[in-house]
Amino acid sequence: MANAQQLITKATEKCYLKCIPAPGASLSGKEQTCLTRCMERYFEAFNIVSSTYVRRVGNERAAGTVAEAGL
């Protein structure tokens, strides 16, 4: 749960800095679009990295199990 909160906080900070150069009373359409796209890309990248990591750990565990069985 803490990782999810950290991800949201980091994505919000990065996208805010990228998309809102001069904060005002409301967001322009361009700023809204930028924020939406930025957050989507951030979470997509996180999902790709996470799934790759989980797959790699699974493969390493499977390889370790096979290696141990062969001893």
Image: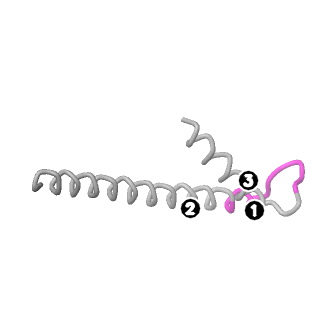
Q: Read off the residue under disc 1.
A: 19
Q: Read off the residue under disc 3.
A: 13
Kind of residue at disc 2:
Arg
Residue 30 is left or right of residue 2, and the answer is right
Q: Read off the residue under disc 2.
A: 41
In depth, the one of 20 and 69 nearer the eye is: 69
Rendered location of residue 29, percent (x, y): 74, 59
Residue 36 is left or right of residue 31, and the answer is left
Kind of residue at disc 1:
Cys
* Magenta span: 23-34
Circle nearer the N terminus (2, 3): 3
The residue lying at 19 percent from left, 51 percent from top is 65
- Quarter where residue 2 is shown: top right
Element marked by disc 2: helix
> Distance of mark 2 from mark 1, alpha carbons?
13 Å
Identify the coloring: one colour
- Quarter where residue 34 is shown: bottom right
Circle nearer the N terminus (3, 1): 3
Mark 3 Cα within 10 Å, few/some/many (few <14, many 20+)?
few
Q: Is residue 29 magenta?
A: yes
Rendered location of residue 36, percent (x, y): 63, 56
In depth, the one of 30 and 67 nearer the eye is: 67
**Relative to residue 58, is residue 1 depicted above or below?**
above
Name the quadrant of the C terminus. bottom left
Q: Nearer the viewer, mark 3 or mark 1?
A: 3
Mark 1 Cα within 10 Å, few/some/many (few <14, many 20+)?
some
In depth, the one of 11 and 22 nearer the eye is: 11
